[in-house]
């Protein structure tokens, strides 16, 4: 008897479990059932998308701002092309004004030695600007090798999921890791990193020098051109007044109109089209060069300070944070890549001997920087002189 009961109860329990497993529920209207199913499906999808074992408020904020980051990154990527064209057009316009407007003026007034000095300096400066800008936009900043496992790394890039060597950072605009990344420059439409950092700085430096030279050298011409433009405006105003008076007078040819500001008897000197264009071009040249000299000069000084300290723009932020953290614990922060001011400059510019200051700094040079951008052993001459400065 007991055996027969257990024989019946077994399949009944199995059926009940199957029903529970298949989600047996009491009957609902089909529309409500569909809505409930969709709601549950959406909830599972959302949870699976947001699931992260490292998740937290930071991850949630990052995820919320992701569309904005994407928009800004894409805008900078597209604006980069426009900015590069703008730099080329503005620089070319200044060179064209120098040749077409300034040169004819100074040829008549300057002495031969002064002309020679201006000729050599301006062309040397222009060649260095063009060379460094071309090199900065065309030289890749340097990327960590993918698939190579024997490189010294300090962390893993969250975006690339690849090992990240020291001083390497991920650029969200280029969408890849960059060796010794300084920043992404929209004016170059390129990242500034290990292999083109020197070109970027040299371009900023020589462009600032060129702008200071142009605005200082054209100061007298600018003042004369500005005064001439003011005179032109006054003449145009007088001419308009004359026409108005003539139209308003019932006897335009009679003598009653001759003394009311008209120039029928003694016409003033007028400016030719060429003179007008020259004066306006000189004012444009001075304003543009002065503005760029101020803005780019400030940027160049800031980068010079960073190079003197052996830091990149990104490291400046992280080092400051670390310095505050250690100071709170009564410790002193030391930058591992600071070899001392002069040695930092030598390493940055690739100057190994005294002759290199001329051949590698004051003349166009495409020599490679020290190291491969992944390990940061200083050159032997730096180790010999700066052991005490080296980081701990
Ligand atoms: Zn990366
Ligand atoms: Zn970049």
Image (tube, rainbow, N blue to C red):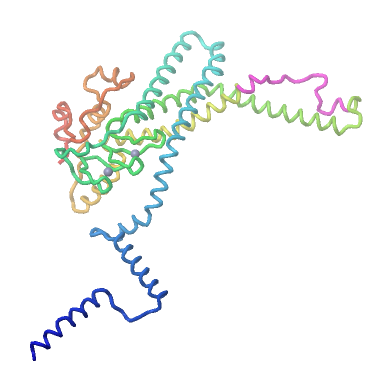
Which quadrant does the N terminus fall into? bottom left
Write the residue at 52% across / 20% down: 96
Image location (x, y in percent) of residue 139: 32, 29
Q: How many marks?
A: 0
Q: Indicate left or right for 339 with 39 as reference.
A: left
Q: Indicate left or right for 388 with 124 as reference.
A: left
Confirm whether the magenta stretch covers residue 276: yes
Which quadrant does the C terminus fall into? top left
Write the residue at 27% across / 46% down: 318
Query: Where ligand 2 lies, by quadrant?
Result: top left
Q: Can you say whether 204 is above or below 147 in the image?
A: above
Please provide the residue range marked out in magenta. 257-277
**81 or 251, which is in the foreground?**
81
Image location (x, y in percent) of residue 358: 30, 18
Q: Can you say whether 13 is above or below 221 in the image?
A: below
**307 or 73, which is in the foreground?**
73
Q: Indicate left or right for 181 with 210 as reference.
A: left
> What secondary structure do most residues of the magenta stretch adopt?
loop
Confirm whether the magenta stretch covers residue 289: no
Q: Can you say whether 342 is above or below 155 in the image?
A: above
Image location (x, y in percent) of residue 142: 27, 33
Q: Quadrant of residue 38?
A: bottom left
């Amino acid at each position: 008897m007991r055996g027969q009961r257990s024989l019946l109860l077994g399949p009944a329990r199995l059926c009940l479990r199957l029903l529970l497993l298949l989600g047996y529920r009491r009957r609902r209207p089909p529309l409500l059932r569909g809505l409930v199913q969709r709601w549950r499906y959406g909830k599972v999808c959302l949870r699976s998308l947001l699931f992260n074992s490292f998740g937290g408020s930071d991850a949630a904020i990052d995820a919320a701002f992701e569309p904005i980051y994407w928009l800004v990154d894409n805008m900078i990527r597209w604006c980069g092309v426009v900015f590069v064209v703008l730099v080329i057009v503005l620089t070319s316009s200044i060179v064209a004004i120098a040749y077409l407007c300034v040169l004819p003026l100074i040829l008549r007034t300057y002495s031969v030695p002064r002309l020679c000095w201006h000729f050599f300096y301006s062309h040397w400066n222009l060649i260095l600007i063009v060379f460094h800008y071309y090199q900065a936009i065309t030289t890749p900043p340097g990327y960590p090798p993918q698939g190579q496992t024997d490189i010294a790394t300090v962390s893993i890039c969250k975006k690339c999921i690849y090992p990240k060597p020291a001083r390497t950072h991920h650029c969200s605009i280029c969408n890849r890791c960059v060796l010794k990344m300084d920043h992404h420059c929209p004016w170059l439409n390129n990242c500034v990193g290990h292999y083109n950092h020197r070109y970027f700085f040299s371009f900023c430096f020589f462009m600032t020098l060129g702008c200071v030279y142009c605005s200082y050298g054209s100061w007298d011409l600018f003042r004369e051109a500005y005064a001439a433009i003011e005179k032109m405006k006054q003449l145009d105003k007088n001419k308009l007044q004359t026409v108005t008076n003539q139209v308003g007078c019932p006897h335009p040819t009679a003598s009653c109109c001759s003394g009311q500001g008209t120039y029928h008897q003694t016409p003033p000197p007028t400016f030719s089209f060429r003179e007008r264009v020259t004066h306006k071009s000189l004012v444009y040249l001075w304003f543009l060069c002065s503005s760029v000299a101020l803005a780019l000069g400030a940027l160049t000084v800031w980068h010079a300070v960073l190079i003197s300290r052996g830091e990149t723009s990104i490291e400046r932020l992280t080092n400051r944070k670390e310095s505050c953290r250690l100071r709170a614990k009564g410790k002193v922060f030391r930058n591992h890549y600071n070899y001392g001011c002069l040695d930092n400059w030598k390493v940055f510019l690739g100057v190994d001997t005294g002759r290199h200051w001329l051949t590698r700094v004051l003349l166009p040079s495409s020599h490679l920087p020290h190291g491969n951008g992944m390990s940061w052993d200083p050159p032997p001459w730096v180790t010999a002189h700066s052991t005490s400065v080296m980081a701990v």
